[in-house]
Image (cartoon, rainbow, N blue to C red):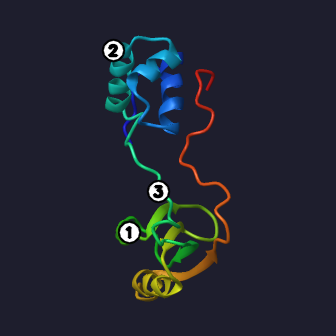
Amino acid sequence: MVLSNMVLDKFDYSLLKLLQKDCLIPLRELAEAVHLSTASVQRRIQKLRENSYVVGNVAVLDPDQLNQVITVIVEVRLNKTHNTDLDVIKESFSSSEIQQCYYVTGEADFMLVLLVPSMKRFQEVCDELFHNNSNVEWFKTTVVLDRVKVSLDVPNINSES
């Protein structure tokens, strides 16, 4: 994680709020929305990228349309959590089916969110990642019935934070 010395003002916060909703808004429209020139908005966005406030631009895809219809949340407990063991397990948790991976406190060591096309594929992923890994003490799965809210938005973006 890169820490920035950049001080954000109300224009930067407004731009970040708009960009996280739709990163394809034309510069002209962004400039109108925040009451700045197009050139100023372009410079500000470049600085926000250079200072790691904006770390990527992605398209949000509909998993159902792409036959990734099953979302599974998996809690994983490890036998060993030394740094080298953690590095190995974190690397193994980078498979394409894993949409999100969190190293957490509590009973489990990791929380994973997976997208798979079928329970058969989920069984294969379980074999690859958990059953065949001697450092996995246990894992517990929860199958999602409905994605009520899915977002990567950072909440409460404003200059008062």
Whether 18 is drawn above or below 129: the answer is above
Residue 9 visible (yes or no): no
> In the figure, is residue 47 to the left or right of 23?
left
Nearer to the camera, 75 or 31: 31
Identify the mark at residue 86; answer none if there is no mark: none
Q: Between 32 and 96, which is closer to the camera in this rendering?
A: 32
Closer to the eye: label 1 or 3: 3
Quick one: label 1, few (<14), some, or many (20+) residues within 10 Å? few
Q: Amino acid at mark 2?
A: Ala
Is disc 3 in contact with disc 2, using a CB cutoff of under 8 Å? Answer: no
Dot placed on the residue nearer the N-terminal end, 1 or 3: 3
Residue 67 in the image, given as x and y percentages of width and height: 47, 72
In the rendered structure, find residue 96 and report the number of the disc placed on it: 1
Q: Residue at x 45, y 11 (%)?
A: 36
Q: Position of residue 124 (x, y in %)?
A: 43, 86
Q: Quadrant of the C terminus?
A: top right
Q: Residue at x 53, y 48 (%)?
A: 152
**Which numbered circle lies on residue 39?**
2
User: Which percent across, then down, holds residue 54?
Assistant: 40, 36
Q: Residues within 10 Å of mark 2 (few under 14, many from 20)?
A: few
Secondary element under disc 3, as helix, strand or loop, is loop
Q: Amino acid at mark 3?
A: Leu
For mark 1, give the secondary structure.
Answer: loop
- Amino acid under label 1? Ser
Q: To which residue does mark 3 refer?
A: 61
Q: Residues under labels 1 and 3: Cα distance?
A: 15 Å
Quick one: quadrant of the N terminus?
A: top left
Question: Which of the two discs, 1 and 2, labels the residue nearer the N terminus?
Answer: 2
